[in-house]
Amino acid sequence: MPAHYAPQTFSITRPDDWHLHVRDGAALHTVVPHTAAQFARALIMPNLKPPVTSTAQALAYRDRIHAAAAAAGHSTFEPLMTLYLTDHLPADEILRAKEAGIVGVKLYPAGATTNSDAGVTDMRKTYATLEAMQRTGMPLLVHGEATSPDIDLFDREAVFIDTQLIPLRRDFPALKVVFEHITTREAVQYVQSAQGAIAASITAHHLLYNRNAIFTGGIRPHYYCLPVLKREIHRQALVDAATGGSPRFFLGTDSAPHATQLKEHASGCAGCYTAHAAIELYASAFEAAQALDKLEAFASFHGPDFYGLPRNTGQITLRRESWTPPQSYPFADTTLKPLAGGEVLHWRMA
Ligand code: DOR
Ligand code: ZN
């Protein structure tokens, strides 16, 4: 397809979301149908309260998500499950997880983000478990931010690469690693040039916005997520990576619902909700880069190829159409404000 590919409608293989938060309980009934309407599969993050630290918990959680999808008419939607790495996750749990079809183990450095209190305080404490992961081919999914309070918030990802990720991968050269929701030029460069099995997911919001979005005309909490939006040069590096065709970069929305009053708060929660219009937001970002023809590989091929899972066989169709997502959705006993709610989007899934 030519670089100026600008169709009115186009179809791609049904995509997957390789990084998603759906919470639990009644909240599932708002957010799971949004994702299941667009994606065949989604990799579900384990940062519940308490976190998902056993195979049995993950399988029960998968059943609750699957039931919420089925109740909305999306019975073929497949939640792919993850475990939460703690200082004490036993190595033998990895074997059980592998046999049960758990797809990855998530590293949250303690204190890095929402519900990360149970995260890892010292990587050394996890080495027996990482050894089992390396041996069984279980991927490590990394929230890549250094947590020391003396590090500038905007530098945390770059510092993490040097102080944590490079040493970790030196000690476990055969461990499959996904550097989740990357936000900086440094992360792009690292993933592009590193040896071995490493890939990165990229969110729609980090492709569409830079850090000005958080402060335009006043503080805008719905643009606050972690890792936080960065400068424009970093956004451009992410767009180049996502649209550049490298199989090391793939779609992961990091759609992270929080009740409106917890976002619009003196100490507002981190997370952007994008599941209501995920593929449309990515299409906007790819079109702005004149790279709509690169969307399918990023959204539908590179993820399953990295995880060693089959590509989907169905298709979705996107149409050029102006529409406005709602400003708010009901969310358990409260509301949820989606990103770009009340704003005109120019692509719509048929
Ligand atoms: O913004 C974020 N929200 N970043 C994360 O890492 C976690 C997520 C959440 O669970 O709300
Ligand atoms: Zn996340």
Image (cartoon, rainbow, N blue to C red):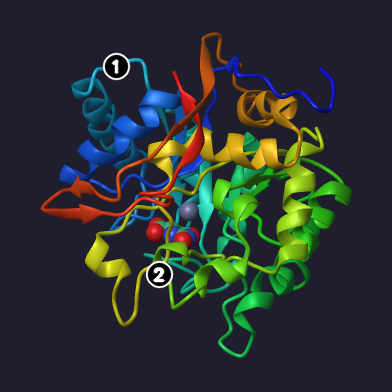
Q: Residue furthest top?
A: 313
* Ligand 1 under 8 Å from disc 2 Cβ: no
Residue at mark 1: 75
Where is residue 152, by image quadrant? bottom right
Ligand 1 quadrant assignment? bottom left
The local crowd at label 2, few if under 14, some if 14 to 19, many if 20 or more residues have their Cα within 10 Å, is many
Q: Nearer the viewer, residue 293 or 149?
A: 293
Direction from residue 222 to residue 295 in the image, left or right: right
Under mark 2, the amino acid is Pro
Say what secondary structure mark 2 lies in. Answer: helix
Residue 306: horizontal and vertical position, in percent?
68, 31
Residue at mark 2: 221
Mark with earlier residue (2, 1): 1
Q: Nearer the viewer, residue 85 or 210?
A: 210
Under mark 1, the amino acid is Ser
The local crowd at label 1, few if under 14, some if 14 to 19, many if 20 or more residues have their Cα within 10 Å, is few
